[in-house]
Image (cartoon, rainbow, N blue to C red):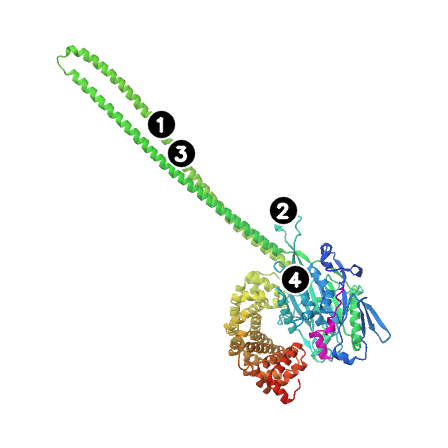
């Protein structure tokens, strides 16, 4: 029975299970409890505006918990054991009724929202159960999809099936993420996930196994539940999401029971956070106000809707006498049953409208507080089996579903202002204003310079022209004046000579009168000529005065131009002063913007993380900058006990900067180093931070700590951080180039703590998966370090060792197939084969599956066949090909045995049938 149950969970249904009714696919009813008001294709999406209007006032939209029943087909053991008995249940999908047989002539009838027969496909199950919830989440509501039922009835198959071999077998988790990624734009919106398990009343992070004790934080005002310590990974594509699901499934606890070969021992919880921006909400702003309305539109923060999808894979309820649990498995079964009982009590109280709902009886009920009786749209699928031997468990599951159908939720839209986006928009607007101001300032300075140069050129040209004209006029008038004076002197001299000659001649007395009269006439003529000369002189004097007046005018114009130049210089100095004032104003505005940004960030953090900044012993001020980091590093009792460690580390990362955090790794105080490396390890767990850490020298600092420190805690945390970084292929090559494998090997030899060894083994296991590093990893002691860590015997350490060996063997097999490697395996040469054979039958499924994979990969290379035969590995290969629980490993082992001539010859010699 164990083997067949596992086939149902990890494999696929029979061919008959793929038959569906393609003529008509029934859509689920609407959020209202009245089934007559059921919506058609994408009904919730089309009616979203009305629902949003109702939710805006916090009144909410009523929505009953919808319940679907899925029947598992009979497995091989039930076909044999129950061959003479009819199924204990009968489904009537057309009327949505289920009959539970009491005996051959009597049965009880129950009605459900949907009935899914054993022939229902995975696509049909998703469209009926989960798709309406996913569409609600995309519209800004919270939603929950949960599977409940007896162990081995197909809960994990329904929800968590990856469908890598057969895409039609994909479960609800994979299909839901496909629809979400197809509907959102990752450029403006974001999708992130957390993957957790509730194991023995402890919440553990499946994406970061070191985070194994996460606290629940409840908002005292709204009652919302959050897990601030859980890893939150942003999803960019479907492939990365599937890889994270595979990682989480590998870290989930499972055990082999009589009812299920790989029974989940914990409740798995996948949380998908969808953040979407709302467009077109501010189109009602009036344009009549001009710039004021435009500024109001700029300063109005955008609205975002934050929907959360919770997919819960509950561990199966089981009876101890039927499951055969004992020892630690018995304690796990008790914890599972107690949490499911607490969930049943809460649903009973909600169904009966009881005044008290005991949500605090279990962490499971606290986590599902919003799903039952809260604000989320909830869809429950209960899984049952047909076997009459388990009629009691089937009846209990049916009654659980009947009570859940009576629970009413009040759906509320999760809508808030996006202050961070507003801050980015203000930054862009400020940059635009600054650039425009600088452009205008530069144009103004260029214009001033041009006007100044033009004025100076005009002044210089005027001065030159005026000086030339003045000099020409002065020379002309001076020359004419000198010529006039010379002529007058010559005439006067001639007149004097004539007068003197007339007085000295004797014997001319008779002519004296004539001479006198002539002299008088001559004097009169001279006087007239002199008067004419005086007129000319006056005229020349007047012309000179006119010239001097023009010169004075030119001088006044020159003085005016000089005054204009002085005024221009004064204006330039005023403009320079204005520019300086503008620069000071710019600095002041930048300071105010920085203050606004810090206030916006503070408002955002206060809105999102109020509960996480309140300590159990009282509230303390959050210190800023590097002082805050030092305080948190030196006071681990405060930080370690608080619920907001992850958020505070992210906040410090933004405020202080990575370089300052890395600088504390070299501090003299040992406590400072320890807690600083914890901060770096937490940052390294986020894929978005890994590249920044490596670029800032964080990898080198971590390797230096491994080399120089002797503290076991530093070994553990630093190795964990390196293991996170080693998940990236580029970082793997850097780790090898900086001697990381040698340091990890030395640290493995010195460490004794199982957690430290688990981290080191995990880091080496990641490096073993790189084809390019095989030879170097082996030469620097990586394989021997893995083999040396088996001394610890801790299951978690052995699981990582087995994973590393499987990765190495897989790379060797690929290289041999491609023809790049010849000769026998390096693992066999280093003596790993005996340990592989010894642990091939390990009770821990994680160890056993990796060892079986390693065996198959080693056997694929014919040159290893003789060593494997002599080492006893052939018998284990035969066992794996027959009894392995995983179909892919079983198929690989069978193909390897049939394709190897050496194995075939040995099997014929030993008379082993295959």
Mark 3 and mark 2 lie on one chain; the one further toward the N terminus is: 2
The quarter of the image holding the C terminus is bottom right
Q: Nearer the viewer, residue 117 or 767?
A: 117
Q: What secondary structure is marked by label 1?
A: helix
Q: Nearer the viewer, mark 4 or mark 1?
A: 4
Label 1 belongs to which residue?
546
* Residue 735 position (above or below residue 597): below
Query: Does the segment drawn in magenta span residue 451?
Result: no
Label 2 belongs to which residue?
293
Q: What secondary structure is marked by label 2?
A: helix
Residue 305 placement, left or right of 436? right
Task: Tell me which segment is drawn in magenta.
Answer: 1-24
Mark 1 and mark 3 lie on one chain; the one further toward the N terminus is: 1
Mark 2 and mark 1 lie on one chain; the one further toward the N terminus is: 2
- Cα distance in 3D space between marks 2 and 1: 68 Å
Residue 540 placement, left or right of 71? left
Q: Residues within 10 Å of mark 3 (few under 14, many from 20)?
A: some
């Amino acid at each position: 029975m164990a083997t067949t149950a596992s086939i149902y969970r990890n494999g696929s249904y029979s061919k008959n299970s793929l038959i569906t009714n393609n003529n008509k696919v029934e859509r689920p009813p609407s959020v209202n409890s009245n089934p007559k008001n059921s919506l058609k294709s994408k009904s919730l999406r089309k009616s979203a505006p009305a629902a949003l209007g109702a939710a805006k006032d916090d009144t909410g939209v009523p929505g009953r918990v919808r319940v679907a029943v899925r029947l598992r087909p009979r497995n091989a053991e039930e076909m044999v054991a129950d061959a003479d008995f009819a199924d204990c249940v009968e489904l009537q999908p057309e009327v949505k009724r289920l009959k539970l047989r009491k005996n051959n002539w009597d049965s009880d009838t129950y009605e459900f929202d949907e009935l899914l027969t054993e022939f229902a496909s995975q696509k049909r199950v998703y469209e009926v159960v989960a798709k309406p919830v996913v569409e609600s989440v995309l519209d800004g509501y919270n939603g929950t999809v949960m599977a409940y039922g007896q162990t081995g009835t197909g809960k994990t198959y329904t929800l968590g099936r990856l469908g890598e071999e057969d895409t039609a077998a994909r479960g609800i988790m994979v299909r839901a993420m496909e629809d979400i990624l197809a509907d959102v734009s990752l450029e403006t919106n974001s999708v992130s996930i957390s993957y957790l398990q509730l194991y023995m009343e402890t919440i553990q992070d499946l994406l970061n196994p070191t985070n194994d004790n996460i606290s629940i934080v409840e908002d005292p005002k709204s009652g919302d539940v959050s897990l601030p310590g859980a890893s939150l990974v942003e999803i960019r594509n479907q492939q990365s999401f599937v890889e994270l699901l595979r990682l989480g499934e590998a870290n989930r606890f499972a055990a082999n029971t009589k009812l299920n070969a790989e029974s989940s021992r914990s409740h798995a919880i996948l949380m998908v956070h969808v953040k979407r921006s709302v467009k077109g909400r501010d189109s009602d702003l009036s344009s009549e106000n001009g710039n004021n309305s435009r500024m109001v539109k700029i300063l109005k923060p955008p609205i975002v809707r934050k929907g959360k999808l919770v997919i819960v894979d509950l561990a199966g309820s089981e009876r101890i006498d039927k499951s055969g649990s004992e020892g630690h498995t018995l304690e796990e079964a008790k914890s599972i049953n107690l949490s499911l009982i607490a969930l049943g009590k809460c649903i009973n109280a909600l169904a009966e409208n009881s005044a008290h709902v005991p949500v605090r009886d279990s962490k499971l009920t606290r986590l599902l507080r919003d799903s039952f009786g809260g604000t989320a749209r909830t869809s429950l699928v209960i899984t049952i089996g047909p076997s009459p031997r388990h009629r009691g468990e089937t009846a209990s599951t049916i009654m659980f579903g009947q009570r859940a159908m009576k629970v009413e939720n009040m759906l509320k839209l999760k809508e808030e202002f996006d202050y961070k986006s507003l801050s980015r928009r203000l930054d862009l607007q400020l940059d635009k204003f600054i650039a425009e101001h600088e452009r205008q300032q530069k144009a103004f300075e260029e214009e001033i310079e041009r006007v100044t140069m033009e004025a100076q050129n005009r002044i210089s040209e005027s001065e030159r022209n005026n000086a030339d004209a003045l000099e020409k006029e002065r020379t002309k008038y001076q020359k004419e004046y000198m010529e006039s004076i010379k002529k007058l002197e010559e005439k006067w001299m001639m007149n004097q000579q004539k007068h003197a000659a007339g007085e000295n001649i004797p014997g001319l007395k008779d002519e004296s009168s004539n001479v006198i009269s002539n002299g008088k006439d001559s004097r009169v003529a001279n006087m007239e000529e002199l008067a004419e000369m005086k007129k000319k002189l006056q005229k020349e004097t007047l012309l000179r005065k006119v010239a001097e007046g023009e010169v004075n005018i030119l001088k006044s114009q020159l003085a005016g131009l000089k005054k204009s130049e002085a005024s221009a210089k004064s204006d330039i100095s005023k403009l320079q002063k204005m520019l300086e004032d503008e620069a000071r104003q710019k600095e002041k505005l930048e300071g105010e913007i920085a203050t606004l940004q810090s206030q916006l960030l503070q408002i955002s953090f206060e809105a999102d993380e109020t509960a996480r900044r309140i300590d159990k012993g009282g509230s303390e001020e959050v210190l800023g900058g590097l002082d805050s980091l030092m305080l948190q590093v030196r006071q681990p009792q405060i930080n370690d006990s608080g619920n907001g460690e992850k958020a505070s580390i992210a906040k410090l990362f933004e405020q202080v900067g990575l370089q300052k955090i890395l600088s504390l790794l070299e501090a003299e105080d040992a406590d400072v180093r320890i807690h600083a490396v914890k901060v770096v390890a937490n940052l390294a767990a986020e894929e978005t931070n890994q590249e920044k850490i490596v670029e800032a020298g964080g990898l080198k600092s971590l390797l230096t700590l491994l080399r120089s420190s002797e503290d076991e805690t530093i070994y553990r945390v630093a190795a964990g951080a390196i293991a996170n970084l080693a998940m990236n292929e580029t970082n793997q090559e850097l780790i090898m180039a900086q001697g990381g494998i040698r340091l990890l090997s030395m640290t493995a030899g010195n460490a004794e703590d199982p957690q430290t060894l688990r981290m080191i083994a995990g880091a080496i296991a990641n490096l073993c998966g790189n084809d390019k590093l095989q030879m170097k990893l082996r030469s620097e002691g990586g394989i021997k370090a893995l083999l040396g860590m088996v001394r610890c015997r801790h299951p978690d350490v052995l699981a990582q060792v087995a994973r590393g060996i499987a990765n190495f063997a897989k790379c060797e097999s690929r290289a041999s197939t491609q023809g790049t490697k010849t000769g026998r395996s390096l693992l066999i040469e280093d003596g790993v084969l005996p340990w592989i054979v010894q642990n091939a039958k390990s009770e821990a499924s994680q160890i056993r599956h990796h060892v079986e994979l390693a065996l198959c990969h080693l056997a694929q290379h014919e040159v290893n066949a003789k060593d494997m035969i002599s080492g006893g590995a052939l018998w284990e290969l035969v066992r794996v090909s027959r009894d392995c629980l995983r179909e892919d490993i079983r198929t690989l082992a069978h193909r390897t045995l049939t394709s190897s001539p050496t194995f075939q010859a040995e099997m014929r010699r030993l008379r082993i049938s295959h």
